[in-house]
Image (cartoon, grey):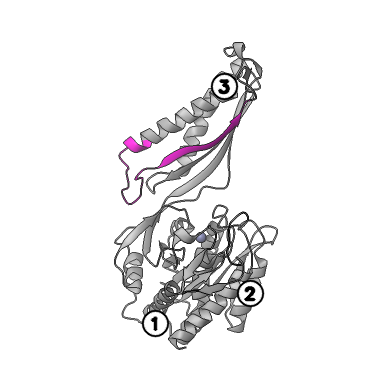
Amino acid sequence: MAYNDRLDNCREILGHLISYDVLGGQSNLTILDYIIGFLNDRQIEYYLVPNEDMTKSSLHCRIGPEADGGVILSGHTDVVPVKGQDWHTEPFTLTARDGKLYGRGSCDMKGFLACCLATVDVFKSAILKKPVYFAFSYDEEIGCLAGPALAKAIKKHYNEKPAYAIIGEPSMMKVVTGHKGICVLKTTITGSAGHSSRIRSEVSAIHVAARLIAWMEDKMEALITSGKLDYRFEPPHSTIHAGMIQGGIAPNVIADKCTIYWDTRVIPADNVSDIVAGFETWCSVYEKELKQRFPGASIVTQEDHPPVVPLGTDRNAAIVQLVTSLVGDDSTQTVAYAAEAGQFAAEGFGTVICGPGDIAQAHRANEFVEESQLSRCLDMLQALAHYLSDEKEGQ
Ligand SMILES: [Zn+2]
């Protein structure tokens, strides 16, 4: 297909993808149906990885031979809400203006999905020696919920071993080797109400909360001074942060309830689960002490969603060499947002993020992707088809 036709084709596919207003948390079966139809028309066998009640599903497929060393192209089908945002165009209708394509998800990250689908015919007509895979997920925007099962399913399903994964989150087509991991938590403290003069006899949930936040600060300090700083990230250490706190009814009433909403973002050298487990252990010792004053005292911590693991791909890894050569740009970077990339890396695939569009455009009103970015992504995928069909370049 001629170059301009491919961009036109990509734009048309993106228009379809954007018309499905599937938000994180909602059923994605409508947009999935479109993708399935697209693959069916091209006789590509696909496999689903549904959630328990079959209302959502990830999809994966292979184009090319059953051979080791293939490359997974991955993206999510869900987007974030538009409610309350000042959009100048209809968010779920693709609108082209001055070389930019506006619409919710144009950048994050249906632009990448459209590029993948627009390159199917290229992959099909190339004589691939190693395969390419598509891996499309759901519920990424509410905590990368489907990524782990999808990455595991791909590893299990195919007889051959895919080697690499490219996650097409917006990176302006730069190669991204790292993102932090994250866990969002809610800690609820139950104390005993009473006159403020009785503060030494009752359990103030607010005073307990203050101690817990002090623990978070101390723990963060310990992580910073542990020597495990990773200067690929800014800041170069793991963070722990309480963003919201609720509790109390009056200055002279001891609070019997207080809730802290907090998160921890970790560099690859730290482990979210260790931090949370350390917190829980400390809380359970503290809780015993509180129960001596008030038997009903409790500290309960819940994870908003399972922790998202970080990505820390080595600068010299083969996947980095490959994708920097595909995009013709040697530089690499890390990103501040969490993504599914760490989840694919955790299954043993050499993984980077590289996709069209600027993350600065994501999640906001008048989200757009530049057509020139889609062109660069199409070029990368064309180069990937070439790499996969060239025996000499393979390893
Ligand atoms: Zn995204």
Asked where in the image residue 227 lies, by quadrant, the reply is top left
Left or right, 328 with reference to 107: left
For residue 155, say whether it is visible. no
Residue designated by label 3: 288
Of pointers 3 and 2, the one earlier in the residue sequence: 2
Q: Amino acid at mark 3?
A: Lys
For residue 378, say whether it is visible. yes
Mark 3 vs mark 2: in front: 2
Q: Amino acid at mark 1?
A: Ser
Q: Residues within 10 Å of mark 1 (few under 14, many from 20)?
A: some
Q: Which residues are magenta?
A: 223-248
**How many numbered discs?**
3
Tell me the element at label 1.
helix
Image location (x, y in percent) of residue 291: 60, 19
Image location (x, y in percent) of residue 390: 35, 82
Which quadrant: the C terminus?
A: bottom left
| Residue ID at (41%, 80%) | 382
Residue designated by label 1: 389
Q: Amino acid at mark 2?
A: Tyr
Of pointers 1 and 2, the one earlier in the residue sequence: 2
Of pointers 3 and 1, the one earlier in the residue sequence: 3
